[in-house]
Image (spheres, rainbow, N blue to C red):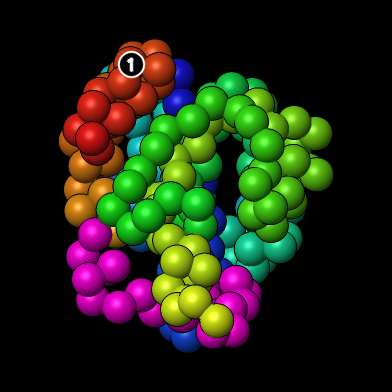
Amino acid sequence: MIQLIIGLGNPGKEHENDRHNAGFWLCDQFADSLHMNFSLDSKFKGHLAHGKYQNHDVWCLKPTTYMNLCGEAVGAICRFHQIPSANILVIHDELDLAPGTVRLKWAGGTGGHNGLKSIQQHLGTLDFWRIRLGIGHPRQLVEPGQPHQEVASYVLKRPPKLDLDRINQSIEKTRLVFSELLSTDPASAMKTLHQASV
């Protein structure tokens, strides 16, 4: 049972359209589908929304700590509400998936993602659910013999329209499994989502 949905990104108007903020974009859709409104909560270092789904509490959190420190916000809310890691869903951008590709995954490594590293540091585990939203990798854009674009600058830029359209399509695919994700075993939603993404 998912109790806490965490969208990863960086705060501020200057970052809201960055690839790195794809987790925020989908988290907003989750909150909207549950008729939840975000408000700034200094205790949990983020924008927090709370609602009910089939009589159980659901929180959506967008940390305002910046990506590298987001575990501070996640740890704070999990301790306060005694939410086990198995009931957490983290939404993040994924370099190793093409734009338009979305995957739901249980546990695993960090894949070098600084947000996941920070969460691991504060929870002491990587045993939680993740939605990986593909944003592509800059190496895929480079012509042979040309210098590689740095990952840091790539994730902090707005995607071109074609990529953004594809990312939005993956967000829409994920919207279709929201109820399944929250009301049943997430593994069932994973199967549905991956079949829809083929």
Q: Relative to 22, say whether 82 is above or below.
A: above
Label 1: few (<14), some (14–19) or many (≥20) C-alpha neighbours in 10 Å: few
Specify the amino acid type for callout 1.
Ser
- Horizontal and vertical percent for residue 196? 20, 33
157 relative position to 191: left or right: right
The N terminus lies in quadrant: top left
- Horizontal and vertical percent for residue 190? 35, 25
**130 in the magenta segment:** no
**Residue 131, image quadrant:** top left
**150 in the magenta segment:** yes
- Horizontal and vertical percent for residue 38? 40, 57
Q: Residue at x 73, y 49 (%)?
A: 117
The C terminus lies in quadrant: top left
- Between residue 126 and residue 195, name the one nearer to us: 195
Q: Residue at x 26, y 49 (%)?
A: 170
Q: Residue at x 47, y 85 (%)?
A: 14
User: Which residue lies under the disc numbered 1?
Assistant: 188
Q: Which residues are magenta?
A: 146-166
- Between residue 158 and residue 34, name the one nearer to us: 158
